[in-house]
Image: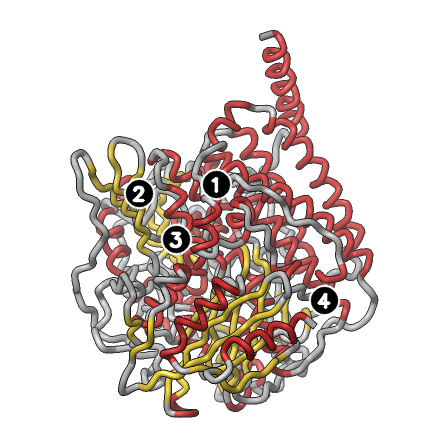
Amino acid sequence: MSLQNIKRQLQDEFSGYISELSVMYGQEIRFSTDADKLPEICGCLYHQMGMPLVDLFAADERSRGGKFALYYVFAHRTKGVFVLVKTLVDEKKPVFPSITGTIHAAHLYEREIRDLFGLQPEGHPDLRPLVFHGNWPQGVYPLRKDYDGSLRPPMENMEQEFLHIHGTGVYEIPVGPVHAGIIEPGHFRFSVAGEPVINLEAQLYFVHKGIEKMCEGAGIEKCFYISERISGDETFANSLAYCQAVEKIAGVEVPERAQYSRVVFAELERLISHLGDLNAVCTDVAYGFAASQFGMMRIWAYQMTDQICSSRFLRSVNSIGGVRRDFLAGWEKKLQEFLLRLYKELTDTIQIIKSNSLFIDRVEHTGVLDLQTAIDLNAVGPAGRAAGIHRDMRKDFPYAAYGKLDFTVPDHNNGDVNCRINVKLEECFEAIKLIRQALEAMPQGGVHIPVDKAPPYRSALGYTEAPRGENIHWVMSGEDNTVFRYKIRTPSFCNWPALCHAVKGNVVPDFPLINKSFNLSYAGNDL
Amino acid sequence: MQVMIYKGMSRMLKMLKKILQYPRLTVDYPRIPFTAALGSGRPVVEKESCTLCGQCVQRCPSSAIVLDRDMQEIGFNLDECIFCSLCAQVCPAGAITVSGDFELAQKYRGALRSLMYEDLGVRMEAKIRKIFGRSLHIREVDAGSCNGCDYEINATMNPLNDLERFGVHFVASPRHADMLLVTGVVTRNMESALRKTYQAVPDPKLVVAVGACACSGGIFRDSYAAQGGVDAVLPVDVYIPGCPPRPQAIIYGILKALDPLK
């Protein structure tokens, strides 16, 4: 009903300049428009209709209609509807109007499109290269179809620009890409005066592997294995988003037992991730006892996944059409015991750490992400929820068996490290609750429907609430059961700019703490 | 004031209780074999049942399986294998099983590959190997992984595995390191940082490649932004296959680099 309302509203607002209005999968409203009408339409969707921009990408569709296509994805989170706006760009005039001025979340998407497709966002405030660090030849665009994906052009050596803050006593601290800890590579430029950070610029894409290009022309099965390897500890969340997109394209309904199994594995992954973050935050404030407690609980969770599916990272567990085999059969009792043990230990530990004012002093009012910034940048997941955006894909766009299960979304508003760890702690309890319910409600039956065919040139969105937040994948199938274009937008892509804002005004030694409370994936951002 | 003291004491007692409740988490690997690995290790083919149909070769997402029609056998390039076990699933004859064998690290990449003749004549120059004594300092570099291997390297230091008990320490700077532990495909954007890190490590030094990506480029090896493994850029002393290798497999590889194990 509400979908029809939105559709009608779109027709009324934009009659005359939109075409090919259609509804797919009961939740994707799609239409096309001319590039010059884009800013107006996007602005209306964002500002008047209250839909955040959740994805923006290009596809080289010159082989199909002679032009590049741009897709703008907006999400109506309370109604569970996506609106996809498509526009075409001619290769002879490779420009499109930038919407960054009115919708700030578009900033990085537009720069990425410029680097990888060579389409210029006109009016964009910051056109420095993003993906390649001065080593990529100008005028070569890897995501264009006429670029051979295995070609490695010779290294260029061009100057890279950073934002410079001028003033008396202002100096810069460069950090990375190789860090002191065992973490992923990234370069941070802190501009500081005394101790407080005035500005932080994060240079990412050090682990850019060209994943999206690799998937083009590859079989749907191979792309599944690539999707598992987008971001190490989000194996299941990413592969699930991919599988759901392909399942929609193939028109396959996944068996019910597999739907519940997917909930169990997705929540186990969330537990492992959140316990790891809590461990890291406690380590960074030198609270050894608490760090060790969370570390131990995380080890228990890893042992559980290892025993159930022989893979600590839940690899080769998911599958297009369900889960690969009935992993959970026979493990219900062991899993329930583990959940009980974890629940008790978590409750005990929280009681101890919450009464420690030394610990609370470090995390409270540290690294505040204010609500307006969070909204402007489309901050997602625990970071968004801690700042007051109480949205969760599992509630707004229920997938797998989430629609049938009872859980609550944490309600916090201060946006500091304390709120982020509280969100994660509460989500650990919700995850335990969800796994218990799923194990009880899970029917007997098959867990997998083989999917080896996907009709060509169909597209669909696949989405999950990854441990780090809203995770949106868009797949367009090609001929012979291949992938024509695979756009991956992980939660980390949205939250990196939010982290840079949250750091401002804090002292440099608090950066590791703030960073860990976000715990963003570099690999998931850089692709 | 008294209330605060009481609260502090009570918290301390609760902490002590927890510490007594879990006195030791560390397992005894490698003194006692690690048996929890149920089946995510080396794929094994039973020659009698294999019909050489080639289905596993065709389906392997990482193209890590080779079929030698002359020798009438199939083999696995473990440096490229992503250990997804799809081969075992698709084999119509049921000839492939995935064993629990995770102690796979090798000093020559060729030894991980199916056809040993590839390795002939490719013996690495014997390195001057000073005895590091009982202490080894490691600098880890992620040169383009998915972060899976890095998590597992971190896990070697958790209370369960506690690699420090062997005198192995992870250090913050390459200048303090004896060994580089490198993960990832070596991306275009990380190549120069990796080289600089290597140059900053004082001689003598060892390089260990961790995971399928570092061993060969893994599933990403043909991409425009990947250099296809660490040995495309640096000399590698030990290759630890896996996607990701479990923490015990990494410990095995590090110890292998030091020669106390065969």
Where is residue B72 drawn, in percent x and y?
Answer: 53, 85
Instruction: Establish whether labels 2 and 4 are both on one chain.
Output: no
Q: Tell me, yes or no, whether the two marked residues, 4 and 3, touch with CB atoms within 8 Å.
A: no
Within 10 angstroms of label 1, few (less than 14), some, or many (20 or more) residues?
Answer: many
What's under tag 2, amino acid-wise?
Answer: Ala
Q: Residue at x 72, y 63 (%)?
A: A401
Whether residue B130 is visible to the viewer of this picture, yes or no, is: no
User: Residue A440 shows which numbered tag?
Assistant: none
In this picture, residue B201 sits left or right of residue A180:
left
Q: Nearer the viewer, mark 4 or mark 3?
A: 3
Q: Chain of mark 2?
A: B
What's under tag 4, amino acid-wise?
Answer: Gln
Q: Nearer the viewer, residue B104 or B200?
A: B200
Q: Chain of mark 1?
A: B
Instruction: Establish whether labels 2 and 1 are both on one chain.
Output: yes
Q: Residue at x 33, y 54 (%)?
A: B207
Alpha carbons under labels 4 and 3: distance apart: 34 Å
Q: What residue sits right under mark 3 in the picture? A: A497
What's under tag 3, amino acid-wise?
Answer: Pro
Q: Residue at x 52, y 75 (%)?
A: A13
Q: What residue sits right under mark 4 in the picture? A: A259
Q: What residue sits right under mark 1 in the picture? A: B163
